[in-house]
Image (cartoon, rainbow, N blue to C red):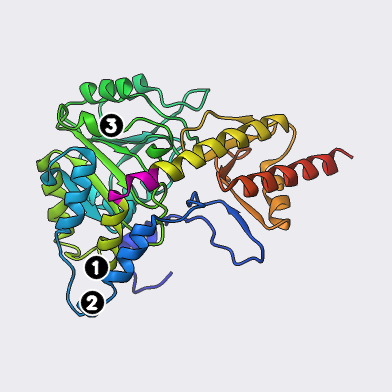
Amino acid sequence: MSRFWSPIVHSLTPYVPGEQPKLANLIKLNTNESPYGPSPAALAAIRAAADDTLRLYPDPASDRLRAAIAQAHGVGMEHVFVGNGSDEVLAHTFQALLQHDAPLLTPDITYSFYPVYCGLYGIAHQPVPLDEAMRVDVEAYRRPCGGIVLPNPNAPTGIALGLDEIATLLRAHPERVVVIDEAYVDFGADSAIPLVRQHPNLLVVRTLSKSHGLAGLRVGYAIGQPDLIEALNRVKDSFNSYPLDRLAQAGAEAAIADREWLAQTTGKIIETRSGLVSSLKNLGFEVLPSQANFVFARHPDRDAAALAAALRERSIIVRHFRTPRIAEWLRITVGTDEECRSLAEALKAILNRNAD
């Protein structure tokens, strides 16, 4: 606390990111990073961009990157907004499109940055409970609101909605913006981007951090109809006209264009996820049906916090949330086959030790 703080700072509860520990021989399965890294074409583009032109400001509109994104998704450039990671894109979205008198609706179990944005921008927020199967109940969103934000697949559950359910939600709230956060969509769910042309109230937010293996580059984007994109640009240009540097724009453009690398690496992760789910179920875990690059699991006879601590002793890090309804669950990133085998072996040893 400080007498020099602005009043709003006293009321903020900041987001707590996943731990980035510095442990020897670490198996890091806590922050949903790709185990395979970015496209070699992206790395080559970053190296090529690291030249004398770094003395110049980057393109404030990121035209080449926006053109690559537009081409990849079959939309016009005027439908694309880019920012410094999807977190910045979401932050601008909350400020530009979701500050209204009625409360914003989000799932009660979801990405924990959403309430932080609400606190920062003074947005009334109303959590909508997931059902008993930890699924988003679209019918529960048929209530007055100032907007809706849903991750699809949801995090940390990994469960996805179908496009028919998203379309139902859009039709139910034609005068409110519905934001679909697709950070994990490339791992098996259907993208809502094809719905953008029919629904002027839809904004789809995506990131290159997960499926493209570029968490360290910080590039995110949104796709929506031009009036929504204009609102985001107005906020961006009132905050920081140069959110993406030259290296980020070059690397992201190459990564977006390399569809073969994306398909190859996401395919590996989906295959490994299937094996991980089987291993966990064989050990007695309940595992939710995931279409993300992580799984959400609990053991009926073991405390989740204790399991996470025991894994940490073996230099394996998973994510545990000490929050209502999910305190007995672990979110486990899908790593390589070898990492997932090591995790399963460690859990088997821990469970057997505790059974003695």
Dot 3 alpha-carbon crowd within 10 angstroms: few under 14, some 14 to 19, many 20 or more: many
Q: Is residue 140 left or right of residue 101?
A: right
**Which quadrant of the figure contains the N terminus?**
bottom left
Residue found at x 41% / y 46%: 211
Residue found at x 73% / y 56%: 314
Element type at marker 2?
Answer: helix
Reading the image, the residue beneath label 1 is 246
The amino acid sitting under disc 2 is Leu
Q: Is residue 205 left or right of residue 77?
A: right
The amino acid sitting under disc 1 is Arg
Question: What is the C-alpha distance between the residues marked 3 and 2?
Answer: 36 Å
Indicate which disc, 3 or 2, sits on the residue closer to the N terminus.
2
Indicate which disc, 1 or 3, sits on the residue closer to the N terminus.
3
**Which quadrant of the figure contains the C terminus?**
top right
Dot 1 alpha-carbon crowd within 10 angstroms: few under 14, some 14 to 19, many 20 or more: many
Where, by quadrant of the figure, is residue 178 drawn? top left
Mark 1 and mark 2 in contact? Answer it, CB < 8 Å: yes
Mark 1 and mark 3 in contact? Answer it, CB < 8 Å: no
Question: What is the C-alpha distance between the residues marked 1 and 3?
Answer: 29 Å
Answer above or below: position of 163 versus 296. Answer: above
Residue 184, horizontal then vertical, whole percent:
41, 41
Reading the image, the residue beneath label 3 is 192
Reading the image, the residue beneath label 2 is 54
